[in-house]
Image: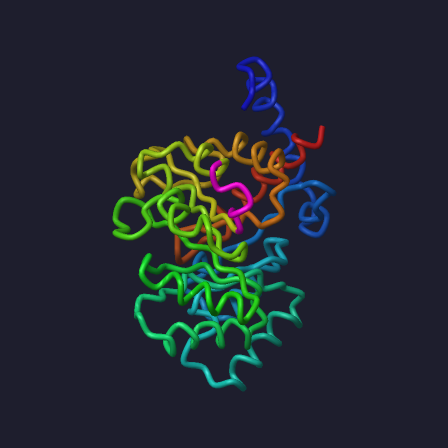
Amino acid sequence: MFSESSRRNFLQAVPAAAAATSALPFSAAAAPAAGDIKLGIASYSFREFGRRLCIKYTKELGITLLTIKEFHALYRSTPQELASAKNDFAKAGITLTGGGTVYMLKDDDADVKSYFDYAKALGMPMMNIGTTAKIMPTVEKYAKQYDIKIAVHNHGPEDKNFPAPSDALKVIKDMDPRMGVCIDVGHTTRTGKNVLEEIQAAGPRLLDMHVKDLKDLMNRDSQCDVGEGAMPIVDIFKLLKKMNYQGTVHLEYEINADNPLLGMHKSFSYMRGVNAALRA
């Protein structure tokens, strides 16, 4: 994506930009500029905490975009409970960009429909899903009926259905435009695929992204704060800008589950620094 010299110069600028945004109050640091890659949180990062703390910590990090995991709004909730959850996020100024990963694994209309009812009740415009090729036509039917986007989430070598984004693209390539992928960059690199090539191949089917960093791109246990590993974050952001990506890059912070805020803050500072450097 870069010539070697320009890439070296750019990388030298990122730490200074990251330090500058880290020193700002959250309200100033978080304010995106036109053309910035939008940053959000996958609430799996707060899996050890209930909805109240999930909201509190999201605000403390200066983030307003959240894709929620079931921990923070249970599938078995009553309509009243889901309305209350929706209101809790709205009152806090948090926009629900989606939910998941939602596992749709039963070849059963009623089961698939129940998740769309859940998403509709929360006002979610999208669901990240784990599913099978066999069930995908049923999912597509309800995606059109409810006008809710579907982003198939890849889960790496352990995933028997869609280990890499390209595996899902083979199934959805001729489906409704609401059917796309959520690229998890960590799981993608662990398949041995080139994450930049996978992003480019997704094109307009790229509806969402989960970002993390790994010191060893083939080892899920090597996750670290974003900017401290081998993930090509700068090249990813540059490619997303080139593609005019309109979705959100959600930080999915899977380490330090009991005390994630410091690492998440460092990760956002780095990504905000990349955004700032790309503006220059």
Q: Is residue 255 above or below residue 243?
A: below
Depth check, front residue: 124 or 257:
124
Q: Position of residue 227 (x, y in %)?
A: 49, 35
Residue 255 appears left or right of 238: left
At 67% from the left and 35% from the top, the residue drawn is 276
* Residue 101 magenta-highlighted: no
At 71% from the left and 48% from the top, the residue drawn is 31
Question: Total marks drawn?
Answer: 0
At 63% from the left and 58% from the top, the residue drawn is 64
* Residue 202 magenta-highlighted: yes
Q: Position of residue 211 (x, y in %)?
A: 47, 45
What is the magenta segment's predominant secondary structure?
helix
Q: Is residue 158 above or below residue 83?
A: above
Q: Is residue 240 above or below residue 184?
A: above
Q: Position of residue 67 (x, y in %)?
A: 52, 60
Quarter holding the C terminus is top right
Q: Position of residue 1 (x, y in %)?
A: 54, 24
Boundaries of the magenta span: 201-207
